[in-house]
Amino acid sequence: FVYADRGGDGHVVDLLGRGLQFADAINTVSEQYAREIQTPEFGEGMEEVLVARRDRLFGILNGLDYDELDPSRDRHIAANYDVGSLDRRCENKLALQHEARLPLDPDVPLVGMVSRLADQKGFDALAPALDALVQLPLQLVIMGTGEQQYHELLTEASKRYPNLAIFLTFSTPLAQKIYAGSDMFLMPSRLEPCG
């Protein structure tokens, strides 16, 4: 994966290609995606080396740690609950509203989103709908990092809409608070490699 620099006078070293070529193991987010990246459609120019290294290419399905994310014992949320105590979820909603500096209201629908802020995750579809969405009688909490254009869009929108809270970071404790305190989740996506 050293090739002539088109239009330049030197050579370019493709570090990703070299890494794939010499890796002991290569993993992706699913078995299906491991197959897909061996094609020109999804290989992004790396399909030849991935096909050549398919004996070292493994798909490991994304998942979650049920012990860590069990709301009955999650140490990051305000109130633990389970299927027999769903009424306790409201404490998590109020705690999230407080942390997000949203008006405390147990009755307003609270929509949560934890995502990478990128086109692949559907932000190109969300961006034109954001103004209409936040004009609905709801609250929206978004946490994530990603493309600068979405950082700017969300920052500006949060200045205009008091029912929109953004966290341009990633924090496992905050993500768990969003999961435990939200009534609904917003998860647009253009591509989900793990299904």
Image (cartoon, rainbow, N blue to C red):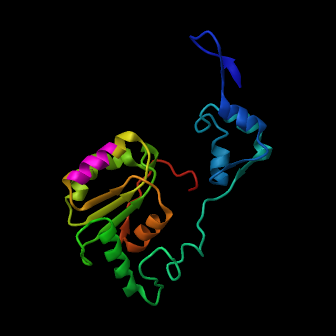
Whether residue 118 appears in magenta in the rendering, the answer is: no
Q: Residue at 64% x, 54% y: name it.
A: 30
Q: Residue at 40% x, 54% y: name it.
A: 188
Q: Is residue 192 left or right of residue 178?
A: right
Q: Is residue 195 left or right of residue 163?
A: right
Q: How many marks?
A: 0
Q: Residue at 49% x, 78% y: name it.
A: 71
Above or below 103: residue 159: above
Q: Dividing the picture into quarters, in which one does residue 150 lie?
A: top left
Residue extending farthest bottom: 84
Image x and y of residue 65, in percent: 60, 70
The range drawn in magenta is 152-159
Q: Main secondary structure of the magenta part?
A: helix
Image x and y of residue 121, in percent: 44, 49
Out of 138 and 168, give the one closest to the viewer.
168
Above or below 94: residue 84: below
Q: Dividing the picture into quarters, in which one does residue 2 lie?
A: top right
Image x and y of residue 68, in percent: 57, 73
Q: Residue at 71% x, 26% y: name it.
A: 1
Above or below 69: residue 190: above
Q: Is residue 37 left or right of residue 103?
A: right
Q: Is residue 129 left or right of residue 38?
A: left
Image x and y of residue 189, in percent: 44, 51
